[in-house]
Image (spheres, rainbow, N blue to C red):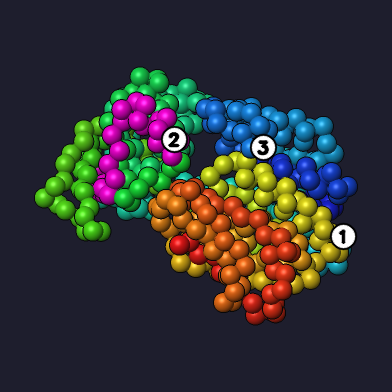
Protein backbone atom coordinates (compact mmCIF):
# COMPACT_ATOMS: atom_id res chain seq x y z
CA UNK A 1 0.00 0.00 0.00
CA UNK A 2 1.32 3.40 -0.99
CA UNK A 3 1.80 5.66 2.05
CA UNK A 4 2.10 9.47 2.00
CA UNK A 5 3.04 11.83 4.84
CA UNK A 6 1.76 15.41 4.63
CA UNK A 7 0.77 18.39 6.77
CA UNK A 8 -2.85 18.69 5.64
CA UNK A 9 -5.32 16.83 3.46
CA UNK A 10 -8.30 18.59 1.89
CA UNK A 11 -11.14 16.21 1.00
CA UNK A 12 -12.94 17.63 -2.02
CA UNK A 13 -11.69 19.58 -5.03
CA UNK A 14 -14.51 22.05 -5.54
CA UNK A 15 -14.40 25.76 -4.76
CA UNK A 16 -14.23 25.14 -1.00
CA UNK A 17 -11.42 22.60 -1.21
CA UNK A 18 -9.32 24.65 -3.61
CA UNK A 19 -9.73 27.90 -1.63
CA UNK A 20 -8.71 26.18 1.62
CA UNK A 21 -5.78 24.33 0.05
CA UNK A 22 -4.44 27.51 -1.57
CA UNK A 23 -4.46 29.25 1.79
CA UNK A 24 -2.56 26.38 3.42
CA UNK A 25 -0.05 26.35 0.58
CA UNK A 26 0.42 30.12 0.83
CA UNK A 27 1.28 29.72 4.51
CA UNK A 28 3.99 27.19 3.75
CA UNK A 29 2.35 23.87 4.62
CA UNK A 30 2.41 20.77 2.44
CA UNK A 31 -1.10 20.01 1.26
CA UNK A 32 -3.01 17.52 -0.88
CA UNK A 33 -6.47 17.68 -2.45
CA UNK A 34 -8.36 14.39 -2.80
CA UNK A 35 -11.11 14.52 -5.44
CA UNK A 36 -13.29 11.59 -6.51
CA UNK A 37 -14.14 13.07 -9.94
CA UNK A 38 -11.67 13.23 -12.84
CA UNK A 39 -11.42 17.02 -12.60
CA UNK A 40 -11.25 19.85 -10.10
CA UNK A 41 -14.07 22.38 -9.85
CA UNK A 42 -16.88 20.29 -8.41
CA UNK A 43 -20.46 21.16 -9.33
CA UNK A 44 -19.34 24.47 -10.83
CA UNK A 45 -18.27 22.69 -14.02
CA UNK A 46 -21.89 21.94 -14.98
CA UNK A 47 -23.20 25.40 -14.01
CA UNK A 48 -22.69 27.09 -17.36
CA UNK A 49 -24.97 30.04 -16.52
CA UNK A 50 -23.49 33.32 -15.34
CA UNK A 51 -23.94 35.08 -11.99
CA UNK A 52 -20.83 33.77 -10.22
CA UNK A 53 -17.92 35.81 -8.91
CA UNK A 54 -19.53 39.20 -8.30
CA UNK A 55 -18.12 39.30 -4.78
CA UNK A 56 -15.02 37.15 -5.22
CA UNK A 57 -13.72 38.63 -8.49
CA UNK A 58 -15.88 41.76 -8.88
CA UNK A 59 -17.10 40.51 -12.24
CA UNK A 60 -19.78 38.18 -13.53
CA UNK A 61 -18.57 34.71 -14.55
CA UNK A 62 -20.03 31.34 -15.47
CA UNK A 63 -19.44 28.41 -13.13
CA UNK A 64 -16.59 26.90 -15.21
CA UNK A 65 -14.95 30.32 -15.55
CA UNK A 66 -15.11 30.80 -11.79
CA UNK A 67 -13.64 27.34 -11.16
CA UNK A 68 -10.89 27.88 -13.74
CA UNK A 69 -9.59 30.90 -11.81
CA UNK A 70 -8.90 28.60 -8.84
CA UNK A 71 -7.76 25.60 -10.89
CA UNK A 72 -5.04 27.68 -12.54
CA UNK A 73 -3.76 28.77 -9.13
CA UNK A 74 -3.78 25.19 -7.82
CA UNK A 75 -1.82 23.95 -10.84
CA UNK A 76 0.84 26.63 -10.29
CA UNK A 77 1.11 25.84 -6.57
CA UNK A 78 2.86 23.03 -4.70
CA UNK A 79 -0.46 21.39 -3.84
CA UNK A 80 -0.61 17.67 -4.65
CA UNK A 81 -3.84 16.76 -6.46
CA UNK A 82 -5.23 13.21 -6.55
CA UNK A 83 -8.14 12.87 -9.00
CA UNK A 84 -10.38 9.82 -9.44
CA UNK A 85 -9.62 9.10 -5.79
CA UNK A 86 -12.18 8.42 -3.06
CA UNK A 87 -11.55 8.71 0.67
CA UNK A 88 -13.19 5.70 2.31
CA UNK A 89 -12.20 6.30 5.94
CA UNK A 90 -10.60 8.84 8.24
CA UNK A 91 -9.07 7.20 11.30
CA UNK A 92 -7.02 8.37 14.23
CA UNK A 93 -3.35 7.59 13.81
CA UNK A 94 -1.20 5.99 16.50
CA UNK A 95 1.68 8.34 15.76
CA UNK A 96 2.13 11.61 17.64
CA UNK A 97 2.99 13.88 14.72
CA UNK A 98 0.54 12.57 12.14
CA UNK A 99 -2.77 12.39 13.97
CA UNK A 100 -4.93 11.17 11.08
CA UNK A 101 -4.90 8.30 8.61
CA UNK A 102 -6.95 8.55 5.44
CA UNK A 103 -7.59 5.47 3.35
CA UNK A 104 -8.20 6.17 -0.33
CA UNK A 105 -9.13 4.10 -3.35
CA UNK A 106 -8.16 5.04 -6.90
CA UNK A 107 -7.64 3.31 -10.24
CA UNK A 108 -4.02 2.67 -9.22
CA UNK A 109 -4.97 0.92 -5.98
CA UNK A 110 -5.28 1.65 -2.28
CA UNK A 111 -3.42 4.55 -0.75
CA UNK A 112 -2.91 5.60 2.87
CA UNK A 113 -2.23 9.23 3.72
CA UNK A 114 -0.96 10.22 7.15
CA UNK A 115 -1.61 13.87 7.90
CA UNK A 116 -1.36 16.31 10.75
CA UNK A 117 -4.68 17.95 9.86
CA UNK A 118 -7.74 17.27 7.68
CA UNK A 119 -10.09 19.79 6.09
CA UNK A 120 -13.48 18.52 4.95
CA UNK A 121 -14.86 20.16 1.80
CA UNK A 122 -17.03 17.47 0.21
CA UNK A 123 -19.95 19.76 -0.62
CA UNK A 124 -23.55 18.57 -0.61
CA UNK A 125 -25.97 16.35 -2.50
CA UNK A 126 -29.58 16.70 -3.60
CA UNK A 127 -32.55 15.36 -1.72
CA UNK A 128 -34.50 12.89 -3.86
CA UNK A 129 -38.03 11.53 -4.15
CA UNK A 130 -37.43 9.07 -1.33
CA UNK A 131 -36.61 11.93 1.03
CA UNK A 132 -39.95 13.69 0.43
CA UNK A 133 -42.14 10.59 -0.10
CA UNK A 134 -44.30 11.60 -3.05
CA UNK A 135 -46.96 8.92 -3.66
CA UNK A 136 -47.42 7.30 -7.03
CA UNK A 137 -45.76 4.74 -9.28
CA UNK A 138 -42.11 4.74 -10.32
CA UNK A 139 -42.06 5.70 -14.00
CA UNK A 140 -39.11 6.94 -16.04
CA UNK A 141 -38.74 10.68 -16.35
CA UNK A 142 -38.10 11.68 -12.73
CA UNK A 143 -34.77 13.42 -12.12
CA UNK A 144 -33.17 15.60 -9.53
CA UNK A 145 -32.58 19.08 -10.93
CA UNK A 146 -28.80 18.71 -10.62
CA UNK A 147 -28.80 15.47 -12.60
CA UNK A 148 -30.89 17.11 -15.32
CA UNK A 149 -28.42 20.00 -15.35
CA UNK A 150 -25.55 17.59 -15.91
CA UNK A 151 -27.45 15.74 -18.65
CA UNK A 152 -28.16 18.95 -20.56
CA UNK A 153 -24.96 20.93 -19.96
CA UNK A 154 -22.34 18.18 -19.90
CA UNK A 155 -23.77 15.09 -21.61
CA UNK A 156 -25.86 16.90 -24.23
CA UNK A 157 -29.16 15.11 -23.54
CA UNK A 158 -32.60 16.71 -23.14
CA UNK A 159 -34.50 14.79 -20.41
CA UNK A 160 -38.03 15.44 -21.74
CA UNK A 161 -40.42 17.76 -23.57
CA UNK A 162 -43.03 18.87 -21.03
CA UNK A 163 -41.58 19.49 -17.59
CA UNK A 164 -42.86 20.21 -14.08
CA UNK A 165 -40.39 21.19 -11.38
CA UNK A 166 -41.20 20.22 -7.80
CA UNK A 167 -39.60 22.62 -5.33
CA UNK A 168 -38.26 26.10 -5.96
CA UNK A 169 -34.59 25.67 -5.07
CA UNK A 170 -32.08 27.64 -7.12
CA UNK A 171 -30.96 24.69 -9.25
CA UNK A 172 -34.57 23.98 -10.19
CA UNK A 173 -35.23 27.62 -11.07
CA UNK A 174 -32.11 27.80 -13.21
CA UNK A 175 -33.10 24.57 -14.97
CA UNK A 176 -36.54 26.03 -15.70
CA UNK A 177 -34.79 28.71 -17.76
CA UNK A 178 -32.25 26.31 -19.26
CA UNK A 179 -34.89 23.84 -20.43
CA UNK A 180 -36.96 26.69 -21.88
CA UNK A 181 -33.93 27.76 -23.89
CA UNK A 182 -33.51 24.28 -25.41
CA UNK A 183 -37.15 24.08 -26.46
CA UNK A 184 -38.83 22.30 -23.56
CA UNK A 185 -42.16 23.49 -22.17
CA UNK A 186 -41.82 24.10 -18.44
CA UNK A 187 -45.42 23.97 -17.31
CA UNK A 188 -45.04 24.88 -13.62
CA UNK A 189 -42.91 25.07 -10.50
CA UNK A 190 -44.69 23.65 -7.45
CA UNK A 191 -43.55 24.75 -3.97
CA UNK A 192 -44.95 23.40 -0.70
CA UNK A 193 -43.93 26.48 1.30
CA UNK A 194 -45.74 29.85 1.09
CA UNK A 195 -42.55 31.43 -0.25
CA UNK A 196 -39.94 30.48 -2.85
CA UNK A 197 -36.82 28.62 -1.71
CA UNK A 198 -34.53 30.20 -4.30
CA UNK A 199 -32.93 33.61 -4.60
CA UNK A 200 -35.19 36.48 -5.65
CA UNK A 201 -33.08 37.18 -8.74
CA UNK A 202 -33.67 33.61 -9.94
CA UNK A 203 -37.43 33.91 -9.44
CA UNK A 204 -37.40 36.99 -11.68
CA UNK A 205 -34.89 35.87 -14.32
CA UNK A 206 -35.85 32.19 -14.58
CA UNK A 207 -39.62 32.14 -13.98
CA UNK A 208 -41.17 35.56 -14.46
CA UNK A 209 -39.13 36.34 -17.59
CA UNK A 210 -40.40 33.09 -19.15
CA UNK A 211 -43.98 33.27 -17.85
CA UNK A 212 -43.60 30.03 -15.91
CA UNK A 213 -46.28 29.64 -13.20
CA UNK A 214 -45.15 29.26 -9.58
CA UNK A 215 -47.64 27.51 -7.30
CA UNK A 216 -46.86 28.33 -3.67
CA UNK A 217 -48.40 26.53 -0.66
CA UNK A 218 -49.00 23.57 -2.95
CA UNK A 219 -48.04 19.94 -2.48
CA UNK A 220 -47.40 17.32 -5.14
CA UNK A 221 -49.68 14.50 -3.97
CA UNK A 222 -49.29 12.03 -6.82
CA UNK A 223 -47.17 11.19 -9.85
CA UNK A 224 -49.08 9.48 -12.68
CA UNK A 225 -47.70 7.09 -15.26
CA UNK A 226 -46.35 3.55 -15.49
CA UNK A 227 -43.56 3.33 -18.06
CA UNK A 228 -43.12 7.11 -18.34
CA UNK A 229 -44.39 10.07 -16.34
CA UNK A 230 -47.79 11.23 -17.62
CA UNK A 231 -48.60 13.94 -15.11
CA UNK A 232 -48.72 15.02 -11.49
CA UNK A 233 -51.46 15.91 -9.03
CA UNK A 234 -51.12 19.21 -7.15
CA UNK A 235 -53.08 19.91 -3.99
CA UNK A 236 -53.21 23.47 -2.59
CA UNK A 237 -52.72 24.04 1.13
CA UNK A 238 -54.50 26.48 3.42
CA UNK A 239 -53.26 27.12 6.96
CA UNK A 240 -50.95 24.13 6.60
CA UNK A 241 -53.75 21.73 5.64
CA UNK A 242 -54.25 20.00 2.28
CA UNK A 243 -57.41 20.96 0.37
CA UNK A 244 -58.20 17.80 -1.68
CA UNK A 245 -61.31 19.35 -3.19
CA UNK A 246 -59.07 21.92 -4.92
CA UNK A 247 -56.60 19.38 -6.37
CA UNK A 248 -55.70 19.63 -10.04
CA UNK A 249 -53.61 17.74 -12.56
CA UNK A 250 -50.73 18.99 -14.71
CA UNK A 251 -49.87 16.78 -17.68
CA UNK A 252 -46.15 16.33 -18.28
CA UNK A 253 -43.60 13.71 -19.32
CA UNK A 254 -40.78 14.82 -17.02
CA UNK A 255 -40.49 15.80 -13.35
CA UNK A 256 -37.48 17.54 -11.83
CA UNK A 257 -36.98 17.57 -8.07
CA UNK A 258 -35.48 20.71 -6.57
CA UNK A 259 -36.30 20.01 -2.94
CA UNK A 260 -33.18 20.98 -1.08
CA UNK A 261 -29.57 19.98 -0.49
CA UNK A 262 -27.96 17.90 2.24
CA UNK A 263 -24.29 18.18 3.31
CA UNK A 264 -22.29 15.12 2.20
CA UNK A 265 -21.39 13.83 5.65
CA UNK A 266 -21.31 10.04 5.67
CA UNK A 267 -17.51 10.22 5.88
CA UNK A 268 -17.74 12.77 8.71
CA UNK A 269 -20.17 10.65 10.69
CA UNK A 270 -18.02 7.54 10.32
CA UNK A 271 -15.02 9.52 11.61
CA UNK A 272 -16.86 10.30 14.85
CA UNK A 273 -17.58 13.94 14.00
CA UNK A 274 -20.57 15.46 15.79
CA UNK A 275 -23.20 16.82 13.40
CA UNK A 276 -25.57 19.75 13.73
CA UNK A 277 -29.15 18.46 13.89
CA UNK A 278 -30.44 21.47 11.92
CA UNK A 279 -27.86 21.82 9.12
CA UNK A 280 -26.71 18.15 9.03
CA UNK A 281 -23.16 19.51 8.78
CA UNK A 282 -20.42 19.25 11.43
CA UNK A 283 -20.62 21.28 14.61
CA UNK A 284 -17.58 23.56 14.52
CA UNK A 285 -15.92 26.00 16.89
CA UNK A 286 -14.84 29.57 16.17
CA UNK A 287 -11.92 28.21 14.11
CA UNK A 288 -14.21 25.93 12.07
CA UNK A 289 -12.71 22.87 13.78
CA UNK A 290 -14.93 19.89 14.57
CA UNK A 291 -15.01 17.94 17.82
CA UNK A 292 -12.23 15.73 16.38
CA UNK A 293 -8.94 17.48 17.07
CA UNK A 294 -7.30 18.70 13.86
CA UNK A 295 -10.31 18.09 11.57
CA UNK A 296 -11.86 21.24 10.07
CA UNK A 297 -14.85 21.80 7.76
CA UNK A 298 -16.04 24.53 5.41
CA UNK A 299 -18.34 25.23 2.48
CA UNK A 300 -21.48 23.28 1.69
CA UNK A 301 -20.37 20.27 3.73
CA UNK A 302 -20.69 22.55 6.78
CA UNK A 303 -23.95 24.27 5.80
CA UNK A 304 -25.56 24.94 2.44
CA UNK A 305 -24.57 28.36 1.07
CA UNK A 306 -26.37 30.61 -1.41
CA UNK A 307 -23.30 31.81 -3.30
CA UNK A 308 -20.00 30.15 -4.13
CA UNK A 309 -18.39 33.49 -3.23
CA UNK A 310 -19.32 32.90 0.43
CA UNK A 311 -18.05 29.31 0.16
CA UNK A 312 -14.63 30.63 -0.89
CA UNK A 313 -14.57 33.27 1.84
CA UNK A 314 -15.37 30.73 4.54
CA UNK A 315 -12.93 28.17 3.15
CA UNK A 316 -10.04 30.60 3.05
CA UNK A 317 -10.64 31.26 6.73
CA UNK A 318 -10.81 27.51 7.35
CA UNK A 319 -7.43 27.11 5.62
CA UNK A 320 -5.99 29.93 7.73
CA UNK A 321 -7.40 28.42 10.93
CA UNK A 322 -5.93 25.05 9.99
CA UNK A 323 -2.54 26.72 9.51
CA UNK A 324 -2.84 28.37 12.94
CA UNK A 325 -3.63 25.00 14.50
CA UNK A 326 -0.65 23.42 12.76
CA UNK A 327 1.48 26.20 14.29
CA UNK A 328 0.15 25.33 17.74
CA UNK A 329 -2.21 28.30 18.08
CA UNK A 330 -5.58 27.80 19.80
CA UNK A 331 -8.47 30.16 20.71
CA UNK A 332 -8.07 31.70 24.17
CA UNK A 333 -11.82 31.67 24.83
CA UNK A 334 -14.93 30.61 22.96
CA UNK A 335 -18.53 31.69 23.44
CA UNK A 336 -21.39 29.46 22.37
CA UNK A 337 -23.80 30.82 19.75
CA UNK A 338 -27.55 30.23 19.82
CA UNK A 339 -30.33 30.65 17.28
CA UNK A 340 -32.98 32.89 18.83
CA UNK A 341 -36.39 33.97 17.58
CA UNK A 342 -36.95 33.60 13.83
CA UNK A 343 -33.40 32.29 13.25
CA UNK A 344 -33.08 28.73 11.94
CA UNK A 345 -29.40 28.20 12.71
CA UNK A 346 -26.15 30.02 13.46
CA UNK A 347 -22.74 28.91 12.18
CA UNK A 348 -20.19 28.45 13.66
CA UNK A 349 -21.38 27.07 17.00
CA UNK A 350 -18.83 29.26 18.88
CA UNK A 351 -17.18 32.65 18.45
CA UNK A 352 -13.89 33.99 19.77
CA UNK A 353 -14.35 37.37 21.54
CA UNK A 354 -10.64 38.15 21.09
CA UNK A 355 -10.74 38.02 17.26
CA UNK A 356 -12.90 39.05 14.34
CA UNK A 357 -15.61 36.47 13.64
CA UNK A 358 -17.83 36.02 10.60
CA UNK A 359 -21.10 34.36 11.53
CA UNK A 360 -23.65 33.02 9.04
CA UNK A 361 -27.32 32.38 9.78
CA UNK A 362 -30.67 31.86 8.07
CA UNK A 363 -34.01 33.50 8.80
CA UNK A 364 -37.13 31.41 9.37
CA UNK A 365 -39.43 34.19 8.18
CA UNK A 366 -39.97 36.47 5.22
CA UNK A 367 -40.01 40.07 6.41
CA UNK A 368 -39.19 43.55 5.18
CA UNK A 369 -37.47 46.10 7.44
CA UNK A 370 -36.29 43.53 9.96
CA UNK A 371 -33.78 44.03 12.75
CA UNK A 372 -31.04 41.53 13.60
CA UNK A 373 -30.24 41.60 17.33
CA UNK A 374 -27.26 39.99 19.05
CA UNK A 375 -27.42 39.56 22.81
CA UNK A 376 -24.84 38.32 25.29
CA UNK A 377 -27.05 37.13 28.10
CA UNK A 378 -29.46 40.01 28.74
CA UNK A 379 -27.17 42.63 27.17
CA UNK A 380 -27.76 43.83 23.60
CA UNK A 381 -24.26 44.08 22.11
CA UNK A 382 -25.17 44.78 18.48
CA UNK A 383 -28.16 45.35 16.23
CA UNK A 384 -28.45 45.88 12.50
CA UNK A 385 -31.32 46.77 10.19
CA UNK A 386 -32.04 44.35 7.38
CA UNK A 387 -33.98 45.62 4.36
CA UNK A 388 -35.41 42.14 3.82
CA UNK A 389 -34.89 38.71 5.31
CA UNK A 390 -36.06 35.40 3.89
CA UNK A 391 -35.08 31.74 4.36
CA UNK A 392 -33.55 31.49 0.89
CA UNK A 393 -30.89 34.14 1.53
CA UNK A 394 -28.10 33.58 4.04
CA UNK A 395 -27.23 36.43 6.40
CA UNK A 396 -23.59 37.18 7.20
CA UNK A 397 -22.45 39.19 10.21
CA UNK A 398 -19.02 40.33 11.40
CA UNK A 399 -18.25 40.49 15.11
CA UNK A 400 -15.07 42.13 16.40
CA UNK A 401 -13.51 42.39 19.89
CA UNK A 402 -14.97 45.88 20.32
CA UNK A 403 -18.48 44.37 20.26
CA UNK A 404 -17.64 42.50 23.45
CA UNK A 405 -15.96 45.44 25.18
CA UNK A 406 -17.31 45.93 28.70
CA UNK A 407 -19.22 42.64 28.67
CA UNK A 408 -18.98 40.08 31.43
CA UNK A 409 -17.74 36.99 29.57
CA UNK A 410 -17.20 33.53 31.03
CA UNK A 411 -17.16 29.93 29.88
CA UNK A 412 -20.95 29.68 30.21
CA UNK A 413 -21.75 32.81 28.18
CA UNK A 414 -24.18 32.41 25.27
CA UNK A 415 -24.46 34.72 22.27
CA UNK A 416 -28.01 34.74 20.93
CA UNK A 417 -28.99 35.91 17.43
CA UNK A 418 -32.61 36.96 16.85
CA UNK A 419 -34.66 38.65 14.15
CA UNK A 420 -37.36 41.13 15.13
Q: Name the residue rendered at 41%, 53% in the picture.
A: 367
Magenta stretch, residue numbers: 200-223
**Mark 1 and mark 2: Cα distance apart in space:** 43 Å
Asked if residue 367 shows in the view, the reply is yes
Considering only vertical position in the picture, is 170 above or below 414? above
- Under circle 2, the secondary element is helix
Q: Which residue is mark 1?
A: 327
Q: Name the residue rendered at 20%, 48% in the picture.
A: 235
Q: Which residue is mark 2?
A: 202
The mark that comes first in sequence, 1 or 3, is: 3
**Mark 1 and mark 3: Cα distance apart in space:** 28 Å
Relative image position of residue 389 (x, y in whole percent): 46, 51
**Mark 2 and mark 3: Cα distance apart in space:** 20 Å
In screen coordinates, is 280 left or right of 295?
left
- Under circle 3, the secondary element is loop
Q: Which residue is mark 3?
A: 56
Amino acid sequence: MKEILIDAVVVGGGAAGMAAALELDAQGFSCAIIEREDHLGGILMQCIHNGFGLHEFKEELTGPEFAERFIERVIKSKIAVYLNTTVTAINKSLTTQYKHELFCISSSGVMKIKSRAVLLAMGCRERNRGNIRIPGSRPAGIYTAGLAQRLVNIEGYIPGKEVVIIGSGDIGLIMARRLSWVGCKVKAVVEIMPYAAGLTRNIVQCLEDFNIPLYLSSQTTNIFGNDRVEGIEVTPMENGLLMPDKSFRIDCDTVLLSVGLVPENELSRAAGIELNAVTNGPLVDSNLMTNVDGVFASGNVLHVHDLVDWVCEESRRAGSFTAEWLNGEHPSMQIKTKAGSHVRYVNPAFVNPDKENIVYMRSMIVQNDAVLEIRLGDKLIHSRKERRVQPSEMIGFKLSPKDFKGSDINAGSILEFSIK
